[in-house]
Image (cartoon, grey):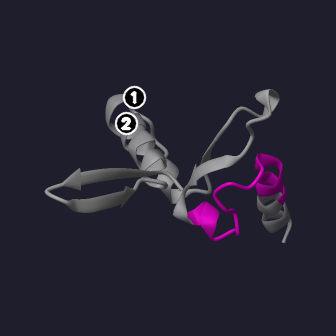
Amino acid sequence: MFGLVVIIGGIIYHVDVNSAFLSWEATYRLYHLGAKLDLRTVPSAVSGDQEKRHGIILAKSIPCKQYGVQTGEPVTDAKRKLNAMKET
């Protein structure tokens, strides 16, 4: 889980930004790059570089979560889940 911890006046705030990374990227692509597809509406994920052995899911869209993809799982497992759902 990714998060931001801020202490203000003795109060600790924890902001979970796990899925926010994907939302920010989707918004940037739509409004600044002119993308036609909103990544938040399709199974999509942010992951590490598989070739550098950092291939885990860092953040995912809600549709991706509905396929059973979880943060922290290997990208290969996530792809397997998505491919299995396409075949049904």
Q: Disc 2 marks which residue?
A: 28
Residue 38 visible in the picture: no
- Whether residue 56 sits left or right of residue 84 in the image: it is left
Q: Position of residue 4 (x, y in %)?
A: 37, 50
- Magenta stretch encompasses residue 51: no
Along the viewing direction, whichever of 8 and 14 lies nearer the viewer: 8
Residue placed furthest toward the left: 9
Q: Residue drawn at (69%, 63%), measured in percent from left and top?
A: 69
Residue placed furthest toward the front: 10
Cα separation between marks 1 and 2: 7 Å
Q: Position of residue 46 (x, y in %)?
A: 59, 44
The image shows a total of numbered marks equal to: 2
Mark nearer the N terminus (1 vs 2) = 2
Q: Is disc 1 placed on a helix, strand or loop?
A: loop
Q: Position of residue 74 (x, y in %)?
A: 78, 50
Q: Position of residue 29 (x, y in %)?
A: 42, 35
Task: Give the quarter of the image for residue 84.
Answer: bottom right
Q: Is disc 2 placed on a helix, strand or loop?
A: helix
Q: In the rendered structure, which amino acid carries the disc numbered 1?
A: Leu
Q: Disc 1 marks which residue?
A: 33
Specify the segment rendered in magenta: 63-80
Q: Which mark, by number, is residue 46?
A: none
The quadrant in which the N terminus is found is bottom right
Q: Residue drawn at (53%, 64%), measured in percent from left and top?
A: 62
Asked whether the beta carbons under mark 1 and mark 2 sit within 8 Å of each other, the answer is yes
The quadrant in which the C terminus is found is bottom right
- Whether residue 11 sits left or right of residue 16 in the image: it is left
